[in-house]
Image (cartoon, rainbow, N blue to C red):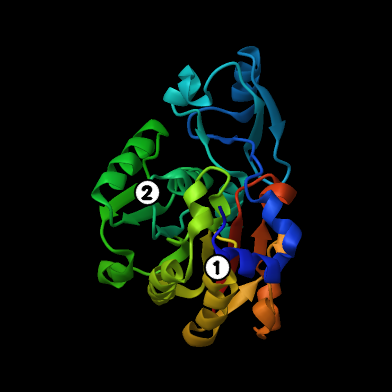
Amino acid sequence: MVSDFLRERYARLFGEGFLRHLKDPVRPALRVNTLRTDEGTLVERLRDKGFRLEKVPWTGCGYWIESSPFSPGATTEYLLGHYLLQDPASQYACETLGPRKDDLVLDMAAAPGGKTTHLAQLLEGTGTVVALDISRQRMRSLRSNLSRMGVENCLAFRMDARDAGELGLEFDRVLLDAPCTGTGTAFKNPEALEKDEKDLEKTVPLQLELIKAGAGVLKKGGTLLYCTCSFLPEEGEMVVARAVGEHGLEILDIGEGEPGLSSPYGMELPEEVERTRRFFPHRHGTQGFYMARLRKV
């Protein structure tokens, strides 16, 4: 059952027909971990086991799992860290951030580690990823994934990312996969259909504080990738528009996905927010996802 709050907002943003897509199934996907194996070898081994894989053309090492004879999380290759089950939009976020060799990278809400391990992979074992998460329980999952995936260039700290300035570091790249309502994940989390104004009152102030903290520790000329698994512009374009005005950031282009909304609910945001990107389950085969690539100027 979709809350009246979401029903009204979705109709205004995307049209009445959007509601029928909220529970569309999304194919599982994996990312090949090149810290442990090479892409060709893993794909061949999984296909020999009976997996049907389709390359995600706009990711570096991503594959949709069309079918599998058993759980993709129960193979020897999975347990050895040769791949991680990860949504293609999440993979694309890390690739869009574009960490370069020897960069110092901050992952502000890191657990359980899908994006953290991907950032380390993109650095090819060079540089350093600093991973933060406030949850003690989720930190266990993060550390487990770092170990399983063979990551050696990561420092993980249990701390509130709003206090990132206390690290005394400036970062070349910052990833903020912000806590949100999760409205883009209704296909696997039915409770996401029940979100309302009270949920936004909790998430949006936190997102604004986190993006302020991320911009504060970003080097001049550095890049911050802000993303959420939400359909709501209150957690996407509206946060980004405010951050650009307050923290000396500019919006950079992103290739894949659909343009951000420059006039949600009839309000006028800077035209540049159309450079941000949205992903939809029924159009891109991913979770509902929003991302913005920002540079400190």
Where's the C terminus, which quadrant? Answer: bottom right
Q: Quadrant of residue 255?
A: bottom right
Taking depth in this image into account, of 78 and 104 the one nearest to the observer is 78
Q: Position of residue 82 (x, y in %)?
A: 50, 28
Q: Position of residue 148 (x, y in %)?
A: 38, 31
The amino acid type, in three-letter code, at marker 2 is Ala
**Residue in view at x 40 percent, y 34 percent:** 150
**Residue in view at x 56 percent, y 59 percent:** 97
Image disc number at residue 5 = 1
Mark found first going from the N terminus, 2 or 1: 1
Taking depth in this image into account, of 194 and 244 the one nearest to the observer is 194
Real-space Cα distance between discs 2 and 1?
30 Å
Q: Is residue 1 above or below residue 297?
A: above
Q: How many numbered marks appear?
A: 2
**Residue in view at x 68 percent, y 56 percent:** 19
Residue that numbered label 2 is attached to: 111
Q: Quadrant of residue 132?
A: bottom left
Image disc number at residue 81 = none
Q: Is residue 40 above or below residue 233?
A: above
The amino acid type, in three-letter code, at marker 1 is Phe
Callout 2: few (<14), some (14-19), or many (20+) C-alpha neighbours within 10 Å? many
Callout 1: few (<14), some (14-19), or many (20+) C-alpha neighbours within 10 Å? few
Examine the rendering and report whether any part of residue 182 can be seen: no
**Residue in view at x 50 percent, y 45 percent:** 118
Q: Position of residue 225 (x, y in %)?
A: 53, 64
Examine the rendering and report whether any part of residue 243 can be seen: yes
What SS does tag 1 mark? helix
Q: Is residue 35 above or below residue 226?
A: above
Q: Position of residue 217 (x, y in %)?
A: 38, 72
Q: Nearer the viewer, mark 2 or mark 1?
A: 1
